Image (tube, helix red, strand yellow):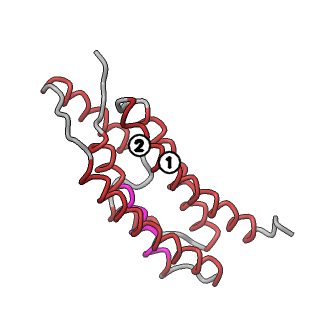
């Protein structure tokens, strides 16, 4: 039996993950001291908001192709396992994570981990959607890769590795 998520289900998951990212970056803005990190986190928070709007438009355009009840249950259990393994399961956890850091470097590391997990999550999800809906996941992956790239550059600058 093949398991598939619809493009609509993937976009719905993306919306939840973007909400977690937004919660993290907003909370982190209250903790970080370095002006370049503040500027980057403000940018990333704005990006998360923009992504949520874009994914909302995608959600409206996606067909919801229902699975049988047995497949739907199996998908639900699999999805729960994937989400439970993430660093932030919900917005409250994302906020708590950002507020619990000891310094700017730890905040950047946590952001990188969150973005890396998001990339891994959607890479896995790409194989669980129908071929004609993989472009939706590819779009999400491209955005998340850009976030990780930005955070990596920020980390290098913070550690003085770009000199």
Q: Position of residue 23 (x, y in %)?
A: 39, 69
Q: Quadrant of residue 127?
A: top left
Give SS at disc 1: helix
Going from the N terminus, do you reach mark 1 or mark 2 first?
Answer: 2
The relative height of residue 63 versus residue 69 in the rendered view (above or below) is below
Residue in the image at 74% along x and 64% along y = 156
Q: Mark 2 highlights which residue?
A: 85
Quarter the N terminus occupies: top left
Which numbered disc, 1 or 2, marks the residue closer to the eye?
A: 1
Is 108 situated left or right of 59 in this image?
right
- Of residues 4 and 155, the one drawn nearer to the viewer in this rendering: 4
Which span is picked out in magenta?
A: 17-28
Marks 1 and 2 in Cβ contact (< 8 Å): no
Label 1 neighbour load within 10 Å: few <14, some 14-19, many 20+: many
Q: Kindly state the secondary structure of the residue where label 2 is placed.
A: loop
Choose between 16 and 91: the one closer to the eye: 16
Q: Which mark is residue 141?
A: 1
Q: Where on the picture, by quarter, is residue 147?
A: bottom right
Can residue 102 be found in the magenta stretch?
Answer: no
Of the pair 140 and 115, the residue shown nearer to us: 140
Residue 19 numbered tag: none
Residue sitting nearer the eye, 145 or 133: 133
Q: Residues within 10 Å of mark 2 (few under 14, many from 20)?
A: few
Q: Where does the image place residue 32, in percent across and percent down from the top left?
A: 56, 79
Q: Main secondary structure of the magenta part?
A: helix
Q: Residue 60, image x and y in percent?
A: 24, 54
Asked if residue 95 lies left or right of residue 38, the reply is: left
User: How many marks on residues?
Assistant: 2
Residue 21 lies within the magenta run: yes
Q: Is residue 29 above or below residue 152?
A: below
How far is disc 1 from disc 2 in space, using C-alphas?
18 Å
Residue under the point 70% across and 64% down: 153
């Amino acid at each position: 039996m093949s398991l598939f998520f619809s493009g609509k289900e993937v976009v719905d998951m993306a919306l939840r993950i973007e909400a977690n990212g937004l919660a993290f970056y907003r909370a982190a803005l209250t903790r970080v001291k370095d002006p370049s990190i503040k500027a980057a986190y403000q940018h990333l928070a704005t990006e998360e908001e923009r992504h949520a709007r874009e994914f909302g438009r995608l959600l409206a355009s996606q067909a919801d192709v229902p699975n049988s009840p047995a497949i739907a249950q199996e998908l639900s259990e699999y999805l729960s396992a994937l989400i439970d393994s993430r660093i932030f399961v919900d917005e409250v956890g994302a906020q708590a994570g950002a507020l619990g850091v000891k310094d700017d470097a730890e905040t950047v590391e946590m952001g990188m981990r969150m973005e890396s997990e998001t990339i891994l999550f959607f890479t896995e999800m790409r194989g669980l959607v129908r071929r004609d809906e993989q472009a939706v996941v590819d779009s999400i992956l491209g955005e998340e890769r850009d976030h990780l790239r930005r955070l990596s550059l920020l980390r290098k600058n913070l550690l003085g590795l770009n000199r």
